[in-house]
Image (cartoon, rainbow, N blue to C red):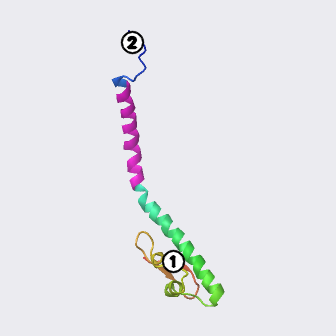
Amino acid sequence: MFNNQRGFTLIEMLIVLMIISVLIILIVPNLGDKSEEVYDKGCSALVSVVQAQADAYYIEEKARPSLKDLLDNDYITEDQQTCPDGTGLSIDIDSGEVSVTE
């Protein structure tokens, strides 16, 4: 009567679920290890942004800024004073270099 059997069998579905499970088991632990790397890259990107703003302040004001100067003159925002991992930023007044405080 019904000769057209196009559906998946139970065995085929179980094999597909097993393959998906193995892929998830392999991928998820690797994602968890990347969070520290993401924070480090986010912090280095923030240092670059604040350094650019410090250089812009120096060009306009002819003086080396502090973080407070950059914040007060709207060169950076309040949340740009710390990295995503919670470490702070500092500016060397003599050289104008932005760095991460440990």
Point out residue 80 in the picture as x, y percentages from the top left corner: 48, 76
Front-most of 4 and 101?
4
Q: State the SS at label 2.
A: loop
Lower sequence index among marks 1 and 2? 2
Question: Which residue corresponds to the image point at 62% horizontal and 81% vertical from the top-left?
Answer: 55
Indicate the quadrant containing the N terminus: top left, top right, bottom left or bottom right: top left
Mark 1 touching mark 2, by CB under 8 A? Answer: no
Rendered position, 83 above or below 69: above
Q: Position of residue 30 (x, y in %)?
A: 41, 50
Query: What's the mark number on residue 56?
Result: none
> Does the magenta run of residues contain 13?
yes
Closer to the camera, 64 or 10?
10
Report the magenta stretch's main SS: helix
The three-letter amino acid code for the residue at tag 2 is Phe
Q: Position of residue 84 (x, y in %)?
A: 43, 69
Q: Is residue 18 magenta?
A: yes
Check disc 1 and give the amino acid type: Ser
The answer to whether 24 appears left or right of 59 in the picture is left
Q: Which residue corresponds to the image point at 49% horizontal and 66% vertical from the top-left?
A: 42
Q: Which mark is residue 99?
A: 1
Q: Residue furthest top?
A: 1
Disc 1 secondary structure class: strand
Counting every numbered tag in the picture gives: 2
Locate the C terminus by quadrant.
bottom left
Dot 2 crowding, Cα within 10 Å, few <14, some 14–19, many 20+:
few
Extent of the magenta region: 12-32
Q: Which residue is labeled 2 in the image?
A: 2
The CA distance from mark 1 to mark 2 is 74 Å
